[in-house]
Image (spheres, rainbow, N blue to C red):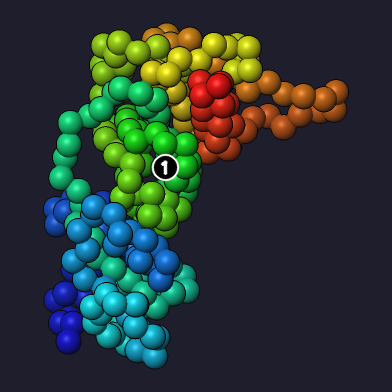
Amino acid sequence: MVTKSRLKLLKSLSRKKNRDDHQLFLVEGYKSILELSQTALIRQQVLVTEGHHALDSLPTDIISKKEMAGISTLKTPPGYLAVFEMPEKKEINLSGLVVALDNVKDPGNLGTIIRLCDWFDVRQIICSLETVDVFNPKCVQASMASLGRVQVDYINLEEVLSTVPSTIFTTAMDGKSVYDTELPNHGVLVMGNESAGISEEIMSLGNKLSIPQYGSQPHTESLNVAMATAVLLGEWRRSTEK
């Protein structure tokens, strides 16, 4: 039986302050829970709505649809919700290819970027202190199980980047085409805010890089930050693994 006080605690995890206080976050959906359970993250509890089948061999607690609706962060709860512990802080690893995020605000974008980093074998993301919380429910949903395989840290981005020995590339519309740039095996790719881009202070620390537009017809103003990250990481891996 899941107590009312426990349900109240789980409901409170929709807020960042409470997630930080309890060092817990929620994961919703059958596939997401199963895949994240196979990573190093510690699963504390799995709740299943009555009438849904068991979640493979994972131990579960059954709750009513009303109770699930009360703690779910989704408009239509999938019927499966798990509580995971936040990972312990580890030393930041700035070797290899690292992605840096400057004030990215949309949790869906951050989650997608985490998933992209997992796909392209980028194991470290460093975020400015203003970037959206990685354990925001929408971010967790978008990242799928990649959240358990990519390390995400929040730091004073300008301070850290000013001491990084690797080459830094900042993304900008007026930058050099990524297809004409010799990309190193070790480097930092900086992606900026959805509307304002990268701050001037951080932009000055790197080499400007861009994705060229093609065709003679009127163009869209810019690419979504997650879409741009996909293009740049794909080209980075292609060009450095010849």
Q: What residue is rendered at 20% in x and 58% in y?
A: 42
Displayed quadrant of residue 10: bottom left
**Which secondary structure lies at badge 1?**
helix
Using the image as rendered, state which of residue 206 and residue 35 is in the foreground.
35
Left or right, 153 with reference to 224: left
x and y, in percent, of residue 5 in the image: 14, 76
Displayed quadrant of residue 217: top right
Total labels drawn: 1
Q: Residue furthest bottom?
A: 51
Using the image as rendered, state which of residue 126 and residue 204 is in the foreground.
126
Left or right, 101 with reference to 230: left
Quadrant including the C terminus: top right
x and y, in percent, of residue 196 in the image: 50, 27
On screen, residue 151 above or below 97: below
Callout 1 amino acid: Asp
Quadrant including the N terminus: bottom left
* Residue 41 visible in the picture: yes
* Residue 172 visible in the picture: no
Displayed quadrant of residue 51: bottom left
Mark 1 — residue? 118
Q: Residue furthest front?
A: 242
